[in-house]
Every structure is written in C-alpha cells, then in structure tokens.
Image: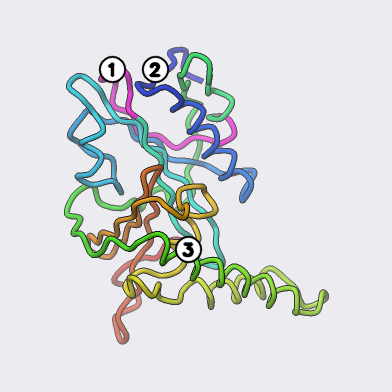
C-alpha cells in the first residue's frame, strides 16, 4: 500500500466506503475496483457534472468503481467521496479486499492498495460529461416493481431441479428478468435498479435521477450511482459498442 492515507472530508465517509466494499465483496471475494481521484470540477467518469457540487474550493473527489455480476451481464456501481484536500490525481485498479483493509474509520481515511492487473470492465468506464437527464422516477414506484422481480427470480430459481440449477441456467434466468425495462423509465433496465438495491443505494424514499450519455445509462441515488450500457437497437451492428464483460 501507499504510505500516505487520503483524508476524507465528510464524517462517516470512510465507514460508508467500507460498507460499499463489503457488499461488493459478497458478490466476488476477489473483486477489483478502479479508483479515480480528481480535482474539484473534473468529475469522475459516471458521475458527470453532478459530482462537482460535492466539492468546495481546494478539495478533490475520490470515485470507486466496482462491477456487480448480475446474470451474464453486469452493472457498474460508483461510490464517490469528497477528499479533505486537493490531493494528487489517482487512476488505478486495486483489490477491493486490500482497499477495505486500508480504510481507517476512526481517522476517516483511506490508504490505497498496490495496483493489480485490472479486469476488462475496468478499461471501459462511463464518460465524465455529456449526461442528459431522462427522468426522475419516484422510488416508491420503482421499489414494488423491483421487489416483485426479486421474488420472481427466487421462486423460479428454486423451481429448477437441483441437478439443473447450474450457474449458466441461473444467469440466463437473471438476464431474462433484469433486462426487462423499468416501467417508470422504459429506457432503463431493471438490472440498474436491482444493482442499486443490492449495493445499498436504492431505498424506498430516496430521490432518484436517470441520465443518459451516448451508450450509457446512469441511475443515481444520494449514496451512489449505477451505470449500465444501453441496449443496442434492433439491427445494430454487433461490433459497434463493446458490452461489459
């Protein structure tokens, strides 16, 4: 690890970041995360213009990107935190577990882990700018639909005979359910809402926004964002937009 901890500006940020990493590691104990630390106004990828408002003069922003493997596809979870000072620019991929070890909740600091060879998704992040607001769906409308889909997945997966309940079978079922459009925002797949829920961002009463930038969609709650690739239009060429691995 580096020897100099990064101080976080807001009380409790270190604990919140630790909770984010713990949830991520439940899905993949060997998970990697990509970190970007930028000066105020630069805006980490995936947060777009919105992250600028989190900082004040002289402060930077740290963004942590992690992939949630939901079915055969995935979603990127983005957690940001204000730094207590401008700091040095950072853009590195590290072990999520080692980064968790470097968090000091009492001191409200994070010490970066040594770089690792990043997975394919880490080289394909959402754009920093160009996000266009699509909708502001009420969480109380999103939540019941999401919970119904969670129950459907549980019931249908349990109905599969145990000797057929393989990872490819469960992934196919998950893709069928989570690729459905969200009723409140038909452009957004249920996968984004599900990812936001399991990582701890989506709760029944939080304000939500949905933005689009090129081939990316972003569901944002106060605690963080979920970014997914938009589905290609029927007939679109297969090689035009690489999908998340």
- The Cα atoms of the two marked residues, 2 and 1, are separated by 8 Å
User: Foreground mark, 1 or 3?
Assistant: 3
Q: Position of residue 25 (x, y in %)?
A: 60, 43
Which mark sits nearer the N-terminus, 3 or 2?
A: 2
Relative to residue 65, is residue 182 depicted above or below? below
Q: Could you tell me which residue is drawn at 49 percent across and 40 percent down?
A: 117
Secondary structure beneath label 2: strand
Q: Which residue is labeled 3 in the image?
A: 143
Badge 1 vs badge 3, beta-carbon distance below 8 Å: no
- Farthest residue toward the bottom? 235
Q: Which residues are magenta?
A: 82-98
Q: Could you tell me which residue is drawn at 26 percent across and 31 percent down?
A: 38
* Drawn side of residue 51 relative to residue 178, left or right: left
Q: Nearer the viewer, residue 117 or 144?
A: 144
Secondary structure beneath label 3: helix
Badge 2 vs badge 1, beta-carbon distance below 8 Å: yes
* Drawn side of residue 13 relative to residue 171, left or right: left
Relative to residue 195, is residue 111 depicted above or below? above
- The Cα atoms of the two marked residues, 3 and 2, are separated by 35 Å
- The Cα atoms of the two marked residues, 1 and 3, are separated by 37 Å
Q: Nearer the viewer, residue 49 or 76?
A: 49
Count of number-bearing discs: 3
Which mark sits nearer the N-terminus, 2 or 1?
A: 2
State the image quarter where residue 65 is shown.
top left
State the image quarter where residue 142 is shown.
bottom left
Q: Position of residue 194 (x, y in %)?
A: 50, 61
Mark 1 surroundings within 10 Å by alpha-carbon count, few (fewer than 14), some (14 through 19), many (20 or more): some
Q: Which residue is labeled 1 in the image?
A: 85
Mark 2 surroundings within 10 Å by alpha-carbon count, few (fewer than 14), some (14 through 19), many (20 or more): some
Q: Which residue is labeled 2 in the image?
A: 7
Which mark sits nearer the N-terminus, 1 or 3?
A: 1
The answer to whether residue 156 is magenta is no
């Amino acid at each position: 690890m580096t020897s100099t901890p990064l101080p976080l500006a807001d009380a409790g940020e270190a604990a919140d970041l630790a909770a984010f990493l713990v949830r991520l590691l439940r899905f993949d104990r060997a998970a990697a995360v990509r970190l970007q630390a930028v000066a105020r106004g630069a805006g980490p990828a995936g947060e777009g213009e919105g992250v600028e408002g989190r900082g004040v003069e002289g402060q930077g922003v740290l963004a942590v990107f992690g992939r949630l493997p939901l079915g055969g596809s995935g979603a990127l979870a983005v957690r940001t935190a204000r730094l207590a000072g401008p700091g040095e620019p950072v853009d590195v991929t590290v072990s999520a577990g080692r980064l968790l070890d470097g968090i000091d909740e009492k001191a409200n600091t994070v010490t970066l882990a040594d770089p690792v060879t990043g997975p394919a998704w880490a080289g394909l992040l959402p754009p920093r700018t160009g996000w266009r607001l699509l909708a502001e769906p009420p969480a109380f409308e999103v939540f019941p639909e999401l919970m119904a889909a969670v129950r459907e997945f549980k019931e249908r997966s349990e109905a599969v005979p145990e000797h057929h309940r393989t990872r490819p079978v469960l992934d196919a079922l998950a893709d069928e359910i989570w690729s459905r459009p969200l009723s409140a925002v038909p452009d957004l797949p249920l996968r984004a809402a599900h990812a936001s829920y399991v990582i701890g961002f989506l709760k029944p009463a939080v304000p939500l926004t949905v933005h689009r930038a090129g081939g990316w969609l972003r569901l944002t709650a106060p605690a963080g964002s979920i970014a997914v690739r938009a589905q290609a239009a029927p007939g679109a060429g297969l090689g035009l937009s690489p999908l998340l691995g």
